[in-house]
Image (spheres, helix red, strand yellow):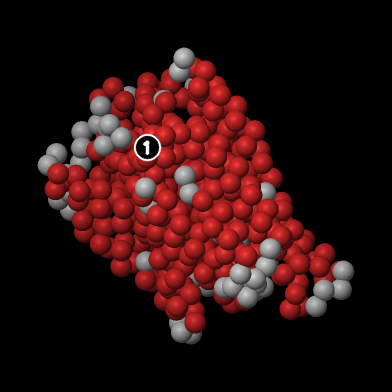
Amino acid sequence: MTPAQTSKLFLLSCIALTVTAMTFGIRAGILGQLGLEFGLTNEQLGYINLMAFWGFPLATMFGGVLYNALGARTLIWIACVCHIIGLVLTIYAQSFWGLMLSSLFIGFANGSVEAGCNPIITDLYKKNKTTMLNKFHVWFPGGIVIGALISWFMTNAGIGWQWQIAVMLVPTFIYGAMLIGAVFPKPDEAILSTSNNVKHLLTPVYFFLVFCMTITATTELGTTQWIQKIMGANEIHPMIIMALIFGIMAVGRYFAGPLVHRFNPSGVLLCSAIISTAGLFLLSQVSGSMIYLATIIFALGVTYFWPTMIGCVAEYLPKTGALGMSLIGGAGMFAVGIWNPVIGGWVDAAEAKAVAQGASPDIVATVAGPAVLQNLMLFPLVLIVAFAGFYFYMKKSKK
């Protein structure tokens, strides 16, 4: 492939991931509007989120196999078509069940992007996979920032949630148009064997990484998807907090190369677990301008989780191929889907407890938010133990 063809395909992948990320950012921004318009509880909103997160692993379960059988181009076309269907169905949704169906299509599209684009990046950049995966995944937090700011500006301007969803059709059509005539790299034929991929999946290291991915994903996305409800009572707008988190993540991932080479992937993951725990603890304790500092610490903690977990599979278990990368991403989203209604239940329970204790309506969220954040802090605490063991295991295995 020529440098121009490589650059075009990398840009196409980044735009597709940006659309994926915008669905998270804008959905988080309109969650309260959906609840009011359709009369939904926090738990029901959690189930709507769950469908998006379950559509993702559904796509990745088949995505790795489809990548091997039909190629990356077909998989990205599937993503584009499902993005369009899901966005249009959301705009015209009339009920809770309509939102559930549209979220499933969007989740399936997002999973297809993940299943198709990660192996494209590793095929394009064989010598620095983890570094380029981090640069590619700049556009997940970058897209969430774009989505969060669009939602914030449009909401403040009195523009309805349907138009906020419609905005995402523009980049979707752009990456669809770029697919026409795009040149894709030829992957290693040995890695295209699904049976060979499956054989190399059945190892203790892969199962361990899958387990950790379920927790890293929930630490990052379980927190940010509920940021409006958890932080909504603070004087700082929750969408500003979200934009700050994902802005830091975008910058951090772009400059990930030296960090990954200095500490190696397992060391980066251990440091990330420690820092994200500290960030969640501070967010549950501070108020006023100190929220900015706590947000920065949390953002630095979760910045490298997702792409470095994918990078671990690509670097340490390369023979698992596209299937290994797509399944571990799917496991992360599947876990977030399971935890979403649970987190929604935590919000409802914390708010009910605050009311029972005599809190006035205007401070209920202020009391409930820290309690939910303390529950969320349990996830990275588990990761500290897990990644400490992984770090010393990998260090010992290299001797």
Looking at the picture, tell me which residue is in the foreground, 194 or 170: 170
* Residue at the image point whose x is 60% and y is 42% from the top: 274
Of all residues, the one furthest to the bottom in this rendering is 158
| Residue 77 percent across, percent down from the top left | 29, 50
The quarter in which the N terminus is drawn is: top left
207 lies above or below 82: above
| Residue 219 percent across, percent down from the top left | 59, 48
Q: Which residue is mark 1?
A: 130
Residue 109 seen anywhere in this rendered image of the structure: no
* Residue at the image point whose x is 82% and y is 71% from the top: 355
Looking at the picture, tell me which residue is in the foreground, 49 or 74: 49
**298 with respect to 62 (left or right):** right
104 lies above or below 164: above
| Residue 380 percent across, percent down from the top left | 63, 43
Instruction: Specify the quadrant of the image occupied by residue 215.
Output: top right
Residue 322 seen anywhere in this rendered image of the structure: yes
Q: Tag 1's secondary structure?
A: helix
Label 1 neighbourhood size at 10 Å, few (<14), some (14-19), many (20+)? many
**314 with respect to 230 (left or right):** left
Looking at the picture, tell me which residue is in the foreground, 98 or 365: 365
* Residue at the image point whose x is 47% and y is 14% from the top: 399
